Image: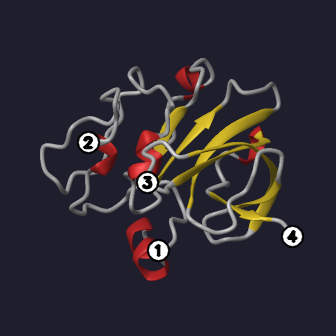
C-alpha cells in the first residue's frame, strides 16, 4: 500500500511523504530558535502558514491548494505558523536548545493548559506515549487563545513526537 493510501485509510501519517519533510540536518543543528516542520501531505485550499509567517519563510502559494514550501534560511522558529495552522500540521524543533534535548514548539488546544515545569506525555502521530517531556514555556503568539507549548524532550524522539498530553 503506498503512503497516500495509508494516509487516506487511517487519517494518520505513517511514513515520510511529500509534504512531510524534516529540514536539512546541517542547517537544523545550527539554527538557534529552531526550524518549522510542516506535515501537510494533501493539496487542500489552505494557506494560513504562509500568510501568517512574518519572516516570509513559508513561501507564498501560487495556488491556494499548494503544499507548503519552506525557505529555511528565512525561518526563525518563531512559531507564528504553528498557531495559525488549523490542521495542527506545523511545529518547530530547536536542536540547539541543549546538548541532549530538543525544544519542540507544538500546538495545544486542550484544557487544562500546561504550565512551565510541568511534566507531559509526548505522543506520536497515533496518540501513543513515546517519551516524557518538560514544559519550558507556553505562548499565545496571535493573542487569539491558540497556545503553543514549548516542550523539551530527548533528541532521539524528534521524529516521533507530534503532540503532548498532561500527566495526572
State the residue position of label 3: 144
Q: CA distance from mark 2 to mark 3?
A: 16 Å
Residue 55: image location, x then y, percent: 35, 26
Q: Is residue 56 visible?
A: yes
State the residue position of label 2: 51
State if disc 1 and disc 2 touch (CB < 8 Å): no
Q: CA distance from mark 2 to mark 1?
A: 30 Å
Q: Which is more foreground, mark 2 or mark 3? A: 3
Residue 97: image location, x then y, percent: 72, 27
Asked whether 124 or 82 is in front, the reply is 82
Q: Which mark is residue 6?
A: 1
Sequence-first tag of 3 and 4: 3
Q: Residues within 10 Å of mark 2 (few under 14, many from 20)?
A: some
Q: CA distance from mark 1 to mark 4?
A: 33 Å
Q: Is disc 2 placed on a helix, strand or loop? A: helix
State if disc 2 and disc 4 touch (CB < 8 Å): no
User: On the picture, is 130 further left or further right than 85?
Assistant: right
Asked whether 4 or 75 is in front, the reply is 75
Amino acid at each position: 500500500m503506498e503512503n497516500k493510501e495509508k494516509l487516506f485509510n487511517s487519517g494518520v501519517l505513517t511514513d515520510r511523504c511529500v509534504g512531510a519533510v524534516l529540514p536539512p540536518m546541517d542547517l537544523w543543528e545550527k539554527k538557534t530558535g529552531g526550524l518549522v516542520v510542516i506535515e501537510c501531505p494533501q493539496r487542500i485550499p489552505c494557506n494560513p502558514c504562509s500568510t501568517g509567517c512574518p519572516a516570509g519563510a513559508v513561501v507564498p502559494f501560487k495556488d491556494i491548494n499548494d503544499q507548503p514550501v519552506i525557505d529555511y534560511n528565512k525561518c526563525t522558529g518563531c512559531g507564528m505558523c504553528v498557531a495559525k495552522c488549523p490542521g495542527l500540521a506545523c511545529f518547530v524543533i530547536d536542536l540547539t536548545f541543549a546538548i541532549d534535548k530538543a525544544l519542540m514548539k507544538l500546538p495545544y488546544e486542550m484544557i487544562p493548559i500546561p504550565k512551565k515545569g510541568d511534566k507531559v506525555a509526548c505522543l506520536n502521530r497515533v496518540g501513543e506515549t513515546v517519551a516524557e517531556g518538560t514544559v519550558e514555556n507556553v505562548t499565545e503568539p496571535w493573542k487569539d487563545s491558540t497556545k503553543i507549548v514549548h516542550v523539551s524532550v530527548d533528541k532521539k524522539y524528534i521524529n516521533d513526537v507530534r503532540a503532548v498530553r498532561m500527566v495526572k
